[in-house]
Amino acid sequence: MEIILFSSIIISFILTALILPKWIKKCRRVGLLWEDMNKFNRVKKVAASGGIVVVMSFILGVLSYIAIRTFILNGNGTNLHIFALLGVILILALIGITDDLLGWQHGGLSAKFRLFLAFMAAIPLVVINAGVSNMDIPFFGVISFGVLYPLFIVPVGIAGATYTYNFLAGFNGLEAGQGIIILTFLSFVAYINKAPWLALVGLCMVASLIVFYFYNKYPAKVFPGDILTYSIGALIACMAILGNFERIAVFVFIPYIIETILKLRGRLKKYSFGVPQKDGSLEMPYNKIYGLTHLSLLILKKFKKKVYERDVTHLIFIFQIIICLSALIIFKDVLFYGL
């Protein structure tokens, strides 16, 4: 009977496939368009904030999962955790769409205010005391954080993942593709750690992102906006907390940790974009490296005379996949043997 739960994933997929083209047409009609910064002619022709379709399709897919469990399978043991997760996503989606509407080129919400709001978005998980306060810290062993876990570590995790996931962005297909890779892997981790409900929630987002990726990949017809990057980052953190695999999630997040360090090197003022040429290729925007996109561009130019936007995106995907595969080896005892 539980096979019908997979219909929730299909619902997220179908809703995104049906609504996203309409969103793109509507944006073009009303002029809600953004420039593609990695193109030589930066004409405003790409539909903005398409992430709103992904987030809503994801939420409706998850709600259908709850409905199936409640009315058909007579089970609702994890509903509180799911609604808390949805609460976090919705709060951050609202923050993201506000930032999108104000416009990043005009400053949007201030960095400090966004960070403060990201901390506040963790409240739904805090009030239900989500997660396990005992954490296995490398070199220190198992440490019980007690009340410090929900009051401090959970908000830091939510805010950190939300804020930094937005750093590695700006290339066609990059944010959506990274979300597909990371959330698919974490859904697998959740499943083998006996949290199939959490795996299914993650796959609802993956299903929506797969549709979105085909419209967002080079050449993009729609951009995700902060509404999507914030939501993906928050979902990654929520899955890590609710599934009790924070260490694995942090390891998988290595590209974003590197990105954050590089962005701090530029005092968070350097953009990830390349310098577009007439032939569609990209050149380095700065003399130094201020992001993984810059590093990828520099590496690729060692092997290719002309480097294009999709080359940079694909190299980062490869790096992320290698990180995920490495996690299977490094954490195999935890993943497969529960040690």
Image (cartoon, rainbow, N blue to C red):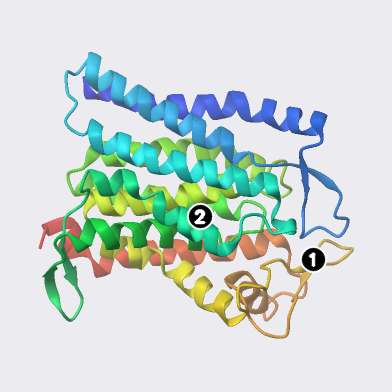
The amino acid type of the residue labelled 2 equals: Gln
- Give percent across and percent down for residue 18: 60, 23
- Give percent across and percent down for residue 284: 74, 76
Quarter holding the N terminus is top left
| Residue furthest bottom in the image | 287
Res. 328 visible in picture: no
How far, Cα to Cα, is label 2 from label 1? 22 Å
The residue shown at (80%, 33%) is 28
Q: Is label 2 in contact with label 1 (beta carbons under 8 Å)?
A: no
- Give percent across and percent down for residue 114: 53, 57
Give SS at disc 1: loop
| Residue furthest top in the image | 71
Q: Residues within 10 Å of mark 1 (few under 14, many from 20)?
A: some
The amino acid type of the residue labelled 1 equals: Ser
Q: How crowded is mark 2: few (under 14 residues within 10 Å), some or many (20 or more)?
A: many
Q: Which of 148 and 286 is in front in this view?
A: 148
Give SS at disc 2: helix
Q: In this view, does 8 lie above or below 335?
A: above
Give the residue number, with chain letter if any, for mark 1: 281
Q: Residue 178 carries which label?
A: 2
Nearer to us of marks 2 and 1 is: 2
- Residue 72, by quadrant, is top left
- Residue 295, by quadrant, is bottom right
Q: Tell me if 174 is positioned left or right of 245 in this view.
A: right
Q: Which mark is residue 311?
A: none
The residue shown at (17%, 59%) is 147
The residue shown at (66%, 58%) is 171
Quarter holding the C terminus is bottom left
